[in-house]
Image (tube, helix red, strand yellow):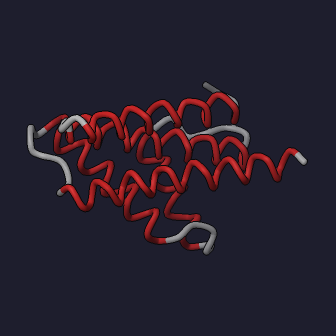
């Protein structure tokens, strides 16, 4: 997946899966899918701006951090991205529960917002 369209198209099915899992009391899966929705949206943004994306989760996190420092990304979205990553890791690797319900809802809303924002960037860069 090395192009903007591929990366941004990968984000939406993960968000759909996250919402489905949340609605069916599968919060761990929801956290994981929500994180990957955000991950793919950020990957699309990196591809749009830089032509290639880092191959690691850490690299994506650094991109997010730089965009906050440049005032190009809201700190709240960065925090939700990092919370989603931590929740996915707790669930996958430590067998611990995901974020509390209210935080999960905020994370899913942030993923939706991030995907929408990246889509707008993509449209404006192609015009």
Which residue is at 52% across, 36% downward? Answer: 11
Q: Nearer the viewer, residue 85 or 30?
A: 30
Instruction: Report the label total.
Output: 0
Q: Is residue 76 above or below residue 34?
A: below
For residue 11, side relative to residue 34 (left or right)? right
Residue 71: image quadrant is: bottom right
**Residue 2 image position (x, y, % from top left):** 65, 28
**Residue 10 image position (x, y, % from top left):** 55, 30
Q: Is residue 68 above or below residue 38?
A: below
Which residue is at 43% across, 69% downward? Answer: 76
Residue 24: image quadrant is: top left
For residue 116, side relative to residue 22 (left or right)? right
**Residue 124 image position (x, y, % from top left):** 82, 53
Q: Nearer the viewer, residue 65 or 38?
A: 38
Q: Residue furthest top?
A: 1
Which residue is at 53% across, 70% downward? Answer: 74
For the N terminus, the quadrant is top right
Which residue is at 18% across, 48% downward? Answer: 98
Q: Residue furthest front?
A: 23
For residue 121, side relative to residue 94 (left or right)? right
Q: Nearer the viewer, residue 78 or 54?
A: 78
**Residue 52 image position (x, y, % from top left):** 67, 38
Residue 91: image quadrant is: top left
Q: Residue furthest left?
A: 95
């Amino acid at each position: 997946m090395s192009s903007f369209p591929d990366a941004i198209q990968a984000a939406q099915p993960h968000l759909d899966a996250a919402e489905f899992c949340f609605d069916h009391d599968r919060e761990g899966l929801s956290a994981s899918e929500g994180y990957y929705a955000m991950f793919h949206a950020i990957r699309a943004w990196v591809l749009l701006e830089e032509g290639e994306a880092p191959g690691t989760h850490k690299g994506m996190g650094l991109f997010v951090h730089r965009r906050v420092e440049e005032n190009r990304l809201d700190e709240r979205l960065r925090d939700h991205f990092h919370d989603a990553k931590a929740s996915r890791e707790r669930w996958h690797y430590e067998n611990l529960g995901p974020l509390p319900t209210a935080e999960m809802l905020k994370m899913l809303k942030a993923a939706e917002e991030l995907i929408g924002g990246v889509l707008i960037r993509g449209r404006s860069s192609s015009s």
